[in-house]
Image (tube, rainbow, N blue to C red):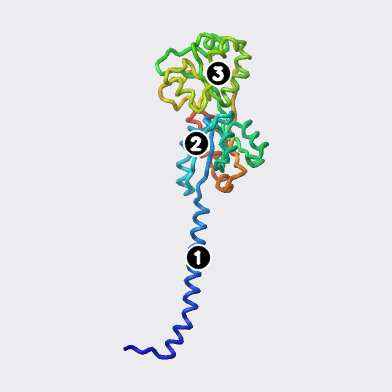
């Protein structure tokens, strides 16, 4: 049987509180490190409208690699009451750190207290164009008169429920003087790309932001609206008032607004607005 000397026993007893304290401190240190890591790499939640979607989808992976963060995305229209529109999503308190949509709609969200005032950053200018089903005859829209003839002759026209469609429905047809002839055969598309509807053959002609038409397989893009009746929309980013990651949100917006992002944005049919 092994005997322990009184001095050694005393030393061991004295050391026990110190060992316990060190263990507790170690656990606390590990917990702090874990929390710091969680804070640093927490997901960023983005809501983006269709006009910027193609550019955003191309840019997101590089940001995730460089930042070490995962970006989770919800897609929806800039305006309107569709269940998946950005205003509807925010009204349901879906998680959001960054919202990207048409500037007038973004400013309306600021006024409603949904987006942080002063956080708005303009990202791109977006023009409106037309597409037909792949292989279909390509009508002439090169002049205002040609556009009027094409719209009158088209058996059916699809347009979006967002910025481009609102312009078409409330202003363009009135300006052209053909509202009574054309609006009844026009179809407002909710929660779907106009190009997808045209590709299926459910509409002969589709109008939407150029950047939303170009990525759709099964359509031929035929060109933009004539300059005299073109409506360029600025798409902008802002920080959601309920954001849990406002600094990360700013980091992402800076990246999307950077000169490095501009070439990728331009390839999607948008005009970049980069930070100076």
Q: How many marks?
A: 3
Q: Position of residue 80 (x, y in %)?
A: 59, 28
- Furthest toward the left, the residue is 1
Residue under pointer 3: 225
As measured in the structure, the alpha-carbon distance from the residue carrying label 2 to the one carrying label 1 is 38 Å
Could you tell whether 125 is left or right of 4 in the image? Answer: right
Report the front residue among 259 and 210: 210
Q: Dot 1 lies on which element? A: helix
Q: Residue at x 63, y 14 (%)?
A: 175
Mark 1 highlights which residue? 29
Helix, strand or loop status at disc 2: helix
For residue 133, which numbered disc appears in the image?
none
Name the quarter where the C terminus is drawn. top right
Mark 2 against mark 1, which lies toward the viewer?
Answer: 1
Q: Is label 1 in contact with label 3 (beta carbons under 8 Å)?
A: no
Distance between mark 3 and mark 2 Cα atoms: 24 Å
- 175 shown above or below 213: above
Q: Quadrant of residue 177?
A: top right
Residue drawn at 46 percent across, 20 percent down: 221
Quadrant where the N terminus is found in the figure: bottom left
Dot 3 or dot 2: first in sequence order is 2
Upstream in the sequence, badge 2 or badge 1?
1
- The residue that label 2 is drawn on is 56
Q: What is the crowding at mark 1: few (fewer than 14 residues within 10 Å), some, or many (at least 20)?
A: few
Q: Secondary structure at mark 3?
A: loop
Q: Position of residue 216 (x, y in %)?
A: 44, 26
Say which quarter of the image contains residue 238.
top right
Q: Residue 229: x, y in percent?
A: 60, 17
């Amino acid at each position: 049987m092994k005997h322990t000397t009184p001095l050694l026993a005393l030393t061991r007893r004295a050391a026990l509180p110190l060992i316990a304290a060190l263990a507790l401190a170690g656990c606390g240190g590990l917990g702090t490190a874990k929390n710091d890591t969680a804070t640093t790499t927490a997901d960023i939640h983005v809501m983006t409208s269709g006009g910027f979607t193609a550019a955003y989808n191309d840019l997101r992976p590089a940001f995730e690699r460089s930042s070490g963060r995962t970006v989770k995305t919800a897609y929806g229209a800039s305006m309107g009451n569709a269940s998946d529109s950005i205003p509807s999503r925010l009204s349901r308190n879906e998680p959001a750190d960054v919202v990207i949509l048409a500037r007038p709609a973004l400013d309306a969200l600021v006024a409603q207290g949904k987006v942080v005032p002063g956080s708005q950053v303009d990202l791109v200018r977006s023009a409106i164009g037309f597409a037909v089903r792949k292989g279909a005859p390509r009508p002439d829209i090169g002049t205002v008169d040609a556009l009027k003839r094409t719209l009158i002759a088209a058996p059916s026209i699809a347009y979006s429920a967002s910025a481009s469609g609102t312009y078409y429905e409330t202003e363009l047809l009135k300006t052209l003087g053909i509202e009574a002839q054309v609006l009844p055969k026009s179809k407002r598309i909710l929660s779907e790309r106009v190009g997808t509807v045209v590709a299926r053959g459910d509409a002969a002609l589709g109008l939407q932001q150029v950047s939303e038409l170009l990525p759709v397989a099964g359509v031929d893009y035929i060109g933009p609206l004539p300059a005299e009746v073109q409506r360029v929309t600025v798409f902008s980013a802002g920080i959601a008032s309920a954001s849990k990651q406002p600094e990360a949100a700013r980091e992402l917006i800076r990246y999307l607004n950077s000169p490095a992002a501009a070439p990728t944005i331009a390839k999607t049919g948008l005009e970049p607005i980069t930070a100076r």
